Image: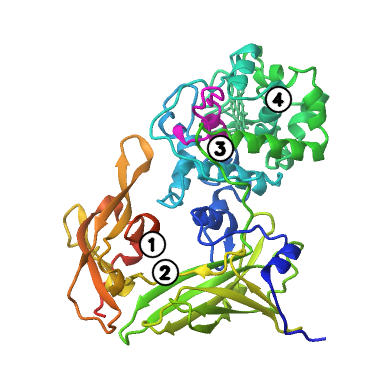
């Protein structure tokens, strides 16, 4: 029987095991990196570690292994009692220490730099790196909590080295909050990927050449390029080629000493493939969640069930508001029962003062099937919208209505019970009236940059600012320094096609080092602050400003 009843989201949500993502969230950017790995809209964070095998351009480099090792070397110097160190990206400043040999760390950061901006912390990217590398190599789902805070300088030294004795290793792990079994599991789970690079440890294999790697799980690609428990089974049956187990110099056989530290109890547990997965997911989560005191991590994130993206809310030449964007709908099999080809989505919006309602139809994205995919078989379908809104009545927010055309079943989503997906129309980003002159004729170290915003007249006394994630390159450090800097916009007396809005403008030379960075537009401050977020300067590169 056809049903046209509207179900409340609370009921539908229970069936969908919704992750409860309230939008907007300060973690939207990292949720995007986690969820949009491939497809029509993608960030491709997984690209360097997919496939899990050796990097085609760098001999002996398994990027998935480098990402996991980077996280460990960052987390290893956590002092649990003192509440210092841990996964805070301080490793960025520690790559010249003898305890951190090799190019793995800087290679990892070079890749991460493309995803690092004012909306994500580098330490969260390192944690996401562990989750992504483990998943890409066929390993378990490592829960990802976010909210880490980046260190601004090097932390204390103390990463374990293979020539140290077992007591030293036990005390290093204990200081970071890990007992003997934890230590064994963490090392074994880490050493399922990669191996020892001859140029980093030339004394371990005098016959090896630079660029060659003695892999922890030997020459069989089925093991070395898989997050599997061969590291444990090979150790237990005596067939291990792990250079830290079977190396000719027993002094550097640290894995042998560690794996045997509890009479092989933990290694025997890890020889069960299912236990290997659960134990590795647990110990990797605890490793990446080792954070300095005062840092509060979220609950493990899941891909959002529904997520809006507003690509434009701007005053147009007719004096109305262009309102455009897209809705991302999770259609993952087994998690939702949604058929991406049997879904219709529309927005029910409420005017600024709540007195007027309207609907906005969406159209399914067709390019590449209109789908994106993430880790753990997550799949999403995109629905686009583009409309005009009366500037005098404006918009306060919307709910999302989803219908299954074949059955007529309809559901309303109200942003996890908060009532609306909120939209503010007090300050608008006038992208078409914003621009950056990148022509090569500009022989200076900056580009002329113009940012225009429309501010609602009843808000026009509040200060408007551009908050820029200013980039400064640093000598010897792969990742630029990012500092949030505020630049004021000035009210103009330029005529606008609407009585509701006045134009504000910022004209400045933008340092070339910062031509491609993230920015927000901020009106007012404190509780009443309004923001247009997740904008990027590079969208304006080479673009001319248009009159309104
Ligand atoms: C006592 C503790 C540990 C010692 C002495 C140790 C030692 C080593 C050594 C000598 C290498 C070779 C590095 C190179 O050639 O550049 C290595 C590689 C590696 N380690 Fe550890 N490790 C320890 C713990 C861990 C832990 C806890 C993890 C992760 C959870 C981990 C993950 C890795 C990975 C993934 C590699 C391979 C890197 C690559 O192939 O590029 N290690 N380790």
Q: Residues within 10 Å of mark 3 (few under 14, many from 20)?
A: many
Whether the residues at callouts 3 and 4 have beta carbons within 8 Å, the answer is no
Residue ID for mark 1: 531
Determine whether, in the image, residue 478 is placed left or right of residue 282: left
- Spatial separation of the CA atoms under disc 1 and disc 2: 8 Å
Determine whether, in the image, residue 256 is placed left or right of residue 23: right
**Which mark is in front, 1 or 4?**
1
Q: Earlier in the sequence, mark 2 or mark 4?
A: 4
> How far from the left and from the top, in percent, is residue 283?
68, 34
Residue 220 badge: none
> How far from the left and from the top, in percent, is residue 358?
52, 84
Secondary structure state at the residue bearing disc 3: helix
Residue ID for mark 4: 184
Where is the C terminus found, in terms of image quarters? bottom left
Along the line of sight, the residue nearer the viewer: 223 or 500: 500
Determine whether, in the image, residue 352 is placed left or right of residue 140: left
> How far from the left and from the top, in percent, is residue 310?
46, 70
> How far from the left and from the top, in percent, is residue 130?
60, 42
Residue ID for mark 3: 66
- Spatial separation of the CA atoms under disc 3 and disc 1: 38 Å
């Amino acid at each position: 029987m056809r049903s046209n009843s509207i179900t409340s989201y609370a009921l539908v949500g229970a069936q969908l095991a919704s992750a409860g993502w309230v939008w907007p969230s300060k973690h939207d950017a990292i949720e995007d990196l986690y969820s949009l790995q491939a497809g029509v809209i993608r960030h491709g964070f997984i690209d360097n570690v997919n496939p899990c095998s050796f990097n085609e351009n760098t001999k002996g480099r398994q990027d998935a292994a480098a990402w996991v090792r980077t996280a460990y070397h960052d987390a290893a110097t956590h002092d649990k009692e003192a509440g210092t160190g841990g996964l805070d990206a301080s490793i960025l400043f520690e790559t010249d220490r003898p305890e951190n040999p090799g190019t793995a760390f800087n290679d990892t950061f070079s890749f991460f730099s493309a995803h690092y901006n004012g909306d994500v912390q580098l330490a969260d990217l390192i944690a996401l790196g562990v989750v992504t590398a483990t998943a890409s190599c066929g390993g378990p789902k490592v829960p990802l909590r976010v909210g880490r805070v980046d260190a601004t300088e090097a932390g204390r030294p103390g990463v374990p080295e293979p020539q140290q004795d077992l007591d030293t290793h036990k005390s290093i792990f204990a200081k970071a909050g890990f007992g003997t079994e934890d230590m064994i599991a963490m090392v074994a789970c880490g050493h399922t990927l990669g191996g020892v690079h001859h140029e980093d440890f030339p004394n371990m294999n005098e016959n090896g050449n630079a660029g060659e790697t003695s892999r922890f799980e030997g020459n069989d690609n089925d093991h070395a390029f898989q997050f599997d428990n061969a590291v444990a089974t090979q150790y237990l049956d005596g067939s291990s080629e792990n250079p830290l187990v079977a190396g000719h110099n027993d002094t550097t056989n640290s894995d042998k000493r560690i794996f045997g530290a509890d009479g092989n109890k933990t290694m025997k547990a890890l020889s069960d493939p299912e236990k290997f997965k659960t134990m590795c997911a647990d110990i990797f989560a605890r490793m990446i969640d080792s954070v300095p005191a005062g840092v509060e991590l979220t609950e493990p994130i899941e891909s959002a069930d529904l997520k809006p993206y507003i690509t434009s809310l701007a005053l147009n030449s007719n004096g109305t508001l262009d309102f455009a964007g897209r809705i991302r709908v999770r259609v993952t099999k087994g998690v939702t029962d949604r058929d991406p080809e049997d879904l219709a989505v529309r927005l029910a919006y409420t005017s600024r003062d709540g007195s007027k309602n309207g609907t906005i139809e969406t159209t399914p994205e067709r390019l590449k099937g209109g789908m994106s995919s993430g880790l753990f078989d997550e799949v999403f379908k995109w629905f686009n919208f583009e409309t005009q809104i009366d500037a005098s009545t404006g918009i306060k927010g919307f709910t999302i209505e989803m219908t299954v055309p074949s059955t007529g079943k309809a559901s309303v989503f109200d942003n996890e019970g908060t009532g609306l997906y909120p939209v503010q129309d007090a300050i608008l980003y006038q992208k078409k009236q914003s621009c950056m002159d990148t022509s090569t004729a500009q022989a200076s170290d900056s580009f002329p940059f113009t940012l225009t915003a429309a501010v609602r007249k009843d808000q026009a006394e509040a200060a408007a600012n551009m908050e820029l994630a200013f980039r400064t390159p640093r000598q010897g450090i792969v990742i630029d320094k990012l500092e949030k800097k505020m630049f004021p916009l000035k009210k103009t007396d330029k005529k606008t096609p609407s009585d509701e809005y006045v134009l504000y403008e910022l004209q400045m030379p933008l340092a070339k080092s910062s031509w491609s960075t993230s920015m927000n537009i901020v009106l007012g401050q404190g509780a009443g602050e309004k923001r247009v977020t997740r904008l990027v300067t590079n969208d304006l590169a080479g673009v001319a400003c248009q009159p309104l």
